[in-house]
Image (cartoon, coloured by chain):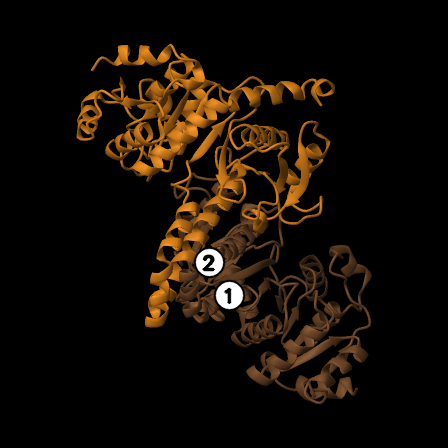
Chain colours: A brown, B orange
Amino acid sequence: MPETEALRATAAAPHATSPVALDAMGGDNAPHEIVAGAVQAVREHGIGVVLVGAPRPLQEALSRHDATTEIPIVRAEEALAMDEGALASLRRPRSSIAVACHLVRRGEASAVVSAGSTAGIVATGKLRLKGQQGVLRPAIAVALPTLPTPTVLLDAGANAEVKPEMLVQFAHLGAAYAETTLRIEDPRIGLLTIGSEPEKGNKLVKRAHELLSAAPGLNFTGNIEGHDLLTGAVNVIVTDGFTGNVALKTMEGSVRYAFAELRGAIQESPVARVGGMLQRGRIRRLQRRLDPEVHGGAVLLGLNGTVVIAHGSSQATGVSAACVLAAELARTGVVARVGERLAATHRPHRLW
Amino acid sequence: MPETEALRATAAAPHATSPVALDAMGGDNAPHEIVAGAVQAVREHGIGVVLVGAPRPLQEALSRHDATTEIPIVRAEEALAMDEGALASLRRPRSSIAVACHLVRRGEASAVVSAGSTAGIVATGKLRLKGQQGVLRPAIAVALPTLPTPTVLLDAGANAEVKPEMLVQFAHLGAAYAETTLRIEDPRIGLLTIGSEPEKGNKLVKRAHELLSAAPGLNFTGNIEGHDLLTGAVNVIVTDGFTGNVALKTMEGSVRYAFAELRGAIQESPVARVGGMLQRGRIRRLQRRLDPEVHGGAVLLGLNGTVVIAHGSSQATGVSAACVLAAELARTGVVARVGERLAATHRPHRLW
């Protein structure tokens, strides 16, 4: 496979329109579903994709889709296993996720997508792309499926232990995501805690409330609680990575549970079953909208490059959605916007 | 109203069959819905109830139900407002919730029920009933509507800041609730965190994992994550009051959201609407099972007396369910079981 030529053709394009570097070896269903997702992203969404991984199995997988000439491959002989954590990223400088990061660093790809282990992706991203200037800690942002626009929740799990200052930065990271990719003007920021009054919460949150209230450039609207996650009360929800991860997984599990219970209720009686059949299509569409695998994935913000973390169990559709999201993040310039926001915090009187 | 005579008649009965002391002045819908809930508890569930509050409005409310001779009133001229917090409980020694606690202390009531402000109830309960011997911190436990048995989640919000040793105690408190009132033998305990491996989480949770693993008398099965809240993977979920409160409210909000979306989907198309009508009864029943107001309320564990915290917005049915739960907690001896468990931790080789 003429990898380098294939790449050169795309590398000449401006950065944001460079292809997405897709880690083809990460995820429970790698490489077949990853490759199928790449094909879907290219053919159905017109996204440029480069597969990063072991050439032989990728060639094979591509040929099943008749796509060997459509999608280039960049060689990476190693891969991080799903159960490998942060340390493995140091031991494997030529892993598929590390090579994907290098492509972004060299401007040959616009963004990285991986369905590998979150810990491995975060560690490799930090190591290979480095944090943006002034960023204390990169954070994982997730777009919750609220209407009319999604709600950004961060940190969803990159930092189990944080300081109040980091929560203020997370607000900027999330605001940049909302402003660029989600096209939300002057996003409203809420702090996730256990009561609406400023003094409600633990020490971390009380101090963060003070800092957020005083921070220029942030439309901080105060505290929000767990039941506000899906009401669209704010555009960006700021929290530490421990609480955010628990809240996100609780939300996913609860929605799944409600639908399963509903299916049970529908199947219980013949009359209800007829009713259920009549609405199956709508319920399925609703379920898809709420399914995290359908609407993209998590975004690692604060690095010198865009990284999208797809669910480990992603199938083709989830991988394709993650590629679309990654291309959109790159096209709308979320990294640059984070840079502008953080630079402005050092000279508050100039921009705001 | 011959309050004291009315009480004397019940006070002679054994402690656990004494009436429930219901704070008639606490909650958004006090006193009318509280009184209506008392009438429901007495007439439909055979629970003994004493109303605590301002006699005149309570008499009036009772007479609307023709229940003035059925339900005694104990005078308390003061009440904590919904927005009053912990300090108010010191300033108001004769508030309805404080008087209700005194009835339990004096053995004239088996348990306290209040739909007042959680902070006020917790502070008053601690002050008037005192913590059980050896209890570092009382905790709020909630029974999540899993099948076949509920899952106890604690702490749901009493302690925003905790130490690892407290989480071990919470496990005992939750296990006592599961063993007695929920009739679960050797309850499985899980620690809420952000990954299944022992080393996943923040400092608090990592240390708690070590302590729980080594603790005698606890069937600790390891870490659980947010999506396990409603799967019944464990019988007791241990967490700090900040995370637990966020998780609980996220769960409630997500289930509510899923149902609202579903209603929207059903109403969108005429065909689906017919289907929706056919199943309305089942969906309503399901929704009721998942509705926290229908299945009782939160329990403040670790005090010398049973305290049930009903939702602030409770209506009659919610109040009645809270009285039933309180009576059941008292009847099955949750306070005594907590005492046994904590005493046993000091002599691990005798009981286990």
Residue A243 rendering spot, x and y as whole percentages? 55, 47
Does the image show residue A244?
A: yes
Secondary structure, mark 1, is: helix
Residue that mark 2 sits on: A236
Q: Decide: few, some or many residues near mark 1? Use Cα within 10 Å; few <14, some 14-19, many ≥20.
A: many
Quadrant of the frame with the N terminus of chain B: top left
Relative to residue B210, is residue A241 drawn left or right?
left
Q: Between residue A220 and residue B195, name the one nearer to us.
A: B195
Secondary structure, mark 2, is: strand
Residue A120 rendering spot, x and y as whole percentages? 71, 60
Q: How many marks?
A: 2
Residue type pointed to by label 1: Tyr
Residue type pointed to by label 2: Val
Relative to residue B307, is residue A249 drawn left or right?
right
Residue that mark 1 sits on: A177
Q: Which image quarter: residue B185?
A: top right
